[in-house]
Image (cartoon, coloured by chain):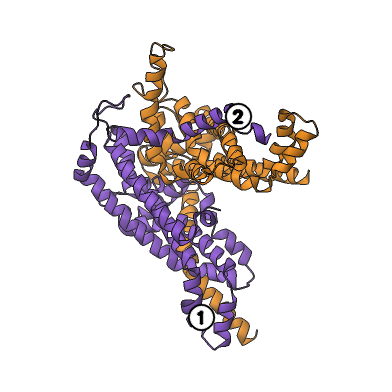
Amino acid sequence: MTSKLKGWPTRVVVTLLYLFLLAPILMVVVISFDTQSTMSFPPQGFTFQWYERLAQNAEFIQGFQVSAVVGAGVALLALLIGVPVAVALTRHDFRFREAMSGFFLSPLMVPAIVLGLALLLVLAPLKITGTYGGLIVAHLAITVPYVVRTTSMSLMTMNRSCEEAARTLGASPWRTFTRVTLPLIAPGVLAGGVIAFLISFDEAVISLFVVGPQATTLPVEIFHYVESRTDPQIAALSVVLIAISVLFMVIIERAAGLKKVLR
Amino acid sequence: MSAKTRSARLTVLGLTVPGLLGLAVSFVLPLAWLLRMSFNRGDSTGLIEETFTLDSYAQFVGDSYYWDMAWETTLLGLGVTVLTIVVSYPIALFLVRTESRFKGILVALAVAPLLTSSVVRTYGWLVLLGNQGVVNQALMGAGLVDQPLALINNRLGVYIALVEIMMPYMILCLLAGFGRFNPELEHAARSLGANRWRTFWRIVWPLSMPGVLTGALLVFVLTISSFVTPRLVGGGKVFYLATEIYDQATATLNWPFAAAIAFILLALFAVVIVIYQRALRRIEAQ
């Protein structure tokens, strides 16, 4: 078996499947530099004009700003409420611990389209659709589970003897947490924050229901743009976004190791 | 109750209350509201009558158009799941077996598409599958077809794009599931005279079952709730439960009906998860 592993049939099949998997991304990169403005193939010439137009597209720039602010707000809020929950779930024993652990993962079991509609029904009467606050609330439920999970994992795998030593030497629980535990679990906390930001930044379906003229996120702008026309500006924007997510992944990899987070 | 357990309880309460409040506001309350809304009476003028009726559910159940839609949604979920397993399995198996020094890069490439939003990848598929797209240009260039094939604005395009979008999730689950896989077992079966086919079905496939099942559940659930891809590749011409929820909520403004469809979708979810757990138990029993 192993000697035949490098046989050409396997290689051909695997190469073709990789091509299928990466085709849309490769396509997007290629046409972002193409001179023609319709979606056709093969490319006619090389240009940066779509990137230049992108830099002048007020809607996209606005959407990018909204998404960045909302993403940062969501990440911060998710960390503030998610990290204490992770501490409770891993460091304390209480009657409803299992149930609570399940509860904090349950938003991931509900389809975004259902949650988006549900949030619209609650946020619209309060007139906070299309505001930063409304968008942050809307993204909270789907990001908290990731923060709880990455932080819990760090808390479970860290060496607890330092914590115990600090307590024995008379440090208060709060001081032990801020001076000893928090620095040790920082990679998990940071990874949770970055994932929360990325999820919020990428989220399109829930946002579709709760955006408004005052604040529309970038994925929603892209969705509406693709719905009506398909010039390569979207491709150029996609390439910029891909570059940004690669950058973030490098940060996670450096901080915590991608494997641990993806597991 | 001693003072110590009381203070421990207070600590747990203090740690969890912000989180519970956060999820109450952003998750529990909206869903409860949605359930209540599904019992109101709505119409296509956007008026909502506060009442307690099963009209919206009856409207869905009584119309064969919506039965077809639910069936097409289920079919899409099953079809995409099976096709995704078929195209992801060879990659996962290759990645588990390979001793290439590029293994790390190959694994990264297989899951890298997760980093790009599905809106962007859907756009890529629109470009690939359009009348002037690569696929049609290649087919016509090779003289296989005279007219461009209709690959978007129909169900076929939705299947193709969704399978690709689900592949990285499936590959990740398969790789995790192959953790127990030991090439020695395959070796042993081969040296004992089993052919490649038999070795695969009797040794490799059963060992990979946990990963396949996890991936299948994830892909099915993600597929039947996916909205962006069916909407953009379907071009507003094919309808699934998810696209109907959006249309009813934003175009028709019949919120009670949209809410009822949302709960029917959740019910479909529940059925799938129960079937999945039964299957899992049966396989674990073996």
C-beta proximity under 8 Å, tags 2 and 1:
no
Q: Does B252 appear above or below B143? A: below
Task: Name the residue: 31% across, 58% down.
Answer: A69
Q: Is residue B253 left or right of residue B169?
A: left
Residue B40 appears in the rendering: no
Quadrant, the N terminus of chain B: bottom right
The chain under label 2 reads A
Chain A shown in which color? purple
Where in the figure is residue A111, as x and y percent of width and height?
Answer: 49, 46
Identify residue for label 1. A176
Task: Name the residue: 55% across, 41% down.
Answer: B100
Quadrant, the C terminus of chain B: top right
Q: Does B64 appear above or below B142? A: below
The alpha-carbon separation of the residues under discs 2 and 1 comes to: 58 Å
Tell me which numbered mark, 2 or 1, is placed earlier along the sequence: 2
Where in the figure is residue B224, as x and y percent of width and height?
Answer: 52, 38
Where in the figure is residue A257, as x and y percent of width and height?
Answer: 50, 57
Task: Name the residue: 64% across, 70% down.
Answer: A95
Q: Which three-letter amino acid code belongs to the residue tagged 1?
A: Thr
Q: Find residue A7 and name its label.
A: 2
Crowd class of label 1 (few under 14; some 14 to 19; many from 20; radius 10 Å): some
- The mark tally for this picture is 2
